[in-house]
Image (cartoon, rainbow, N blue to C red):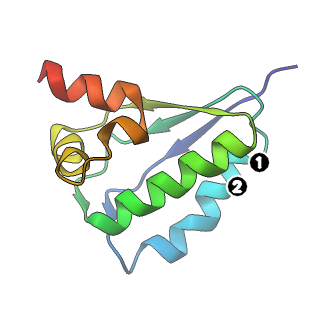
Amino acid sequence: MVAVSALVLPARLLSGDVPAFWPQAQAALAPCTGECRVDASALTQFDSSALAMLLALRREAQARGCALVWHGATGRLADLAALYGIDGLLSPRLASDRQIA
């Protein structure tokens, strides 16, 4: 049976917030065997540490055979990911959202 899980990103995810949030992100992946829906609509304050955490989350999801499906990723998040050249690595949807905007 395929299990779908969900993760809601907080409004603020800066370098000091990432270590406290990481266990919650991992817990969201634990039951996942299909896809994990990541809701980034509330995320308004973030930095490169947030991108590093999202990349680690992607690696963790792939190791579990789980796909991340993004919802509500802002243009700012896509822009920062593109600036670092990792927009396509986070999610093809994140990269395509940026091209449409």
Residue found at the very far right of the displayed protein: 1
Q: Nearer the viewer, residue 81 or 15?
A: 81
Q: Where residue 64 sits: x, y (%)?
A: 75, 42
Inter-mark Cα distance, 1 to 2: 5 Å
Q: Where residue 31 sits: x, y (%)?
A: 79, 41
Q: Nearer the viewer, residue 71 or 54?
A: 54
Residue 13 in which image quadrant: bottom left
Residue 5 in which image quadrant: top right
Judge whether 58 appears above or below 21 on screen. Answer: above
Q: Report the quarter where the N terminus lies.
A: top right
Which SS class for mark 1? loop
Residue found at the very far bottom of the displayed protein: 16
Q: Report the quarter where the C terminus lies.
A: top left
Residue at point 29%, 65% (across, down):
48
Q: Amino acid at mark 2?
A: Ala
Q: Which residue is mark 1?
A: 30
> Which label is found at residue 56?
none
Q: Where residue 45 sits: x, y (%)?
A: 23, 61
Residue at point 22%, 53% (across, down):
44
Within-10-Å neighbours for mark 2: few <14, some 14–19, many 20+: few
Judge whether 66 appears above or below 14 on screen. Answer: above
Callout 1 touching callout 2 (CB < 8 Å): yes
Residue at point 64%, 66% (across, down):
23
Q: How many marks?
A: 2
Which SS class for mark 2? helix
Residue found at the very far front of the displayed protein: 85
Within-10-Å neighbours for mark 1: few <14, some 14–19, many 20+: some
Residue at point 23%, 41% (across, down):
78
Q: Where residue 47 sits: x, y (%)?
A: 25, 65
Q: Which residue is mark 2?
A: 27
Q: Amino acid at mark 1?
A: Ala
Instruction: State left or right for residue 70 relative to residue 96.
Output: right
